[in-house]
Amino acid sequence: MTDYILEVQNIHTFIGEFHILEGVTVQVPPGSITVLLGRNGAGKTTTLRSIIGLTPPRSGQIIFKGEVIQGRRAYHIARMGIGYVPENRIIFRDLTVAQNLQIAERQKGDLDRKADFIFTLFPDLKRLYTLPGGNLSGGQQQMLAVARALVPDNDLLLIDEPSEGLAPVIIEQMMEAIRQLSSHTTVLLVEQNFQVASRLAERYVIIEEGLSVHAGLIADLVQDRDLIKTYLGVA
Ligand SMILES: Nc1ncnc2c1ncn2[C@@H]1O[C@H](COP(=O)(O)OP(=O)(O)OP(=O)(O)O)[C@@H](O)[C@H]1O
Ligand SMILES: [Mg+2]
């Protein structure tokens, strides 16, 4: 028996002929926030896309809740209980906030069941419920993108760079929301902002040029200035 809700074991992923991931291993314990760190182009997004099945790995293994999932279709993997929030806050700009949330339902009634929880995390969305997504600020769109993943019951959320391009006060709100939702759902996060990552996550995995090179507790990483400097380029 495994203690992890998700185990990514030595995956190799190609995009076209390009060998993008050359051995990525990520172990995610349940009930925690794990962050993928690494420089631009390291392979963080490709790792999330490999897990959800959008760029399926050519070799290695991905085990979710004890079942091998690589090779299954993305919608099938999602239905097993994985929510995916891609980078660049992808929402439907012409649909209202309400419609954006409704079409995220996996089963009828999901939104009714989850609305209170979602509005507790993101009160703005209640206020803006009938407005088109395109009218929302960048921060509000990011909140809507995360909220969409909360509509169905998920056991794991993959969230790609939720703080990117947001003002500090909005980043704080987003961090607080992720912290709160993580007591219900395990989170695997990509976060380039090391300050944000180190305050939010319990565990980390560093990806460097398509390879996972380090993993452990964030509390240990923040003490290790050399490691941070070598792989993340921040002092
Ligand atoms: N469609 C594609 N075709 C060719 N190469 C790609 C494609 N998508 C990504 N790559 C390459 O794969 C590598 C990993 O990209 P990925 O988006 O996973 O990195 P990342 O760590 O998420 O970077 P960032 O921090 O900039 O978001 C990069 O070198 C990138 O140029
Ligand atoms: Mg990325």
Image (cartoon, rainbow, N blue to C red):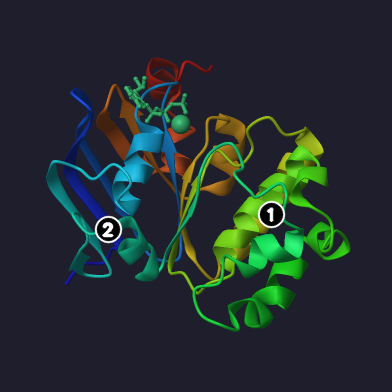
Q: Is 162 in front, or is 224?
A: 162
Quadrant the N terminus occupies: bottom left
Q: Is 173 in front, or is 144?
A: 144
Asked whether mark 2 lies closer than 8 Å to ligand 1, one says no
Q: Is 73 in front, or is 62?
A: 73
Residue depicted at 83% across the width and 57% down the height: 124
Displayed quadrant of residue 43: top left
Mark on residue 144? 1
Asked whether mark 1 lies closer than 8 Å to ligand 2, one says no
Horizontally, is 167 left or right of 235 in the view? Answer: right
Q: In the structure shown, which secondary structural element does the residue marked by tag 2 occupy?
A: loop
Q: Where is residue 113? Give x, y as percent.
A: 64, 83
Horizontally, is 24 left or right of 227 in the view? Answer: left
Q: Amino acid at mark 1?
A: Leu
Displayed quadrant of residue 56: top left
Which residue occupies the extreme front position in the image? 94
Mark on residue 73? 2
Residue depicted at 64% across the width and 76% down the height: 111
The residues bearing labels 2 and 1 have C-alpha atoms spaced at a distance of: 25 Å
Quadrant the C terminus occupies: top right
Q: Amino acid at mark 2?
A: Arg
Q: Determine crowd level at label 2: few under 14, some 14-19, many 20+ residues with C-alpha closer than 10 A.
A: few
Q: Where is residue 15? Give x, y as percent.
A: 25, 30
Displayed quadrant of residue 169: top right
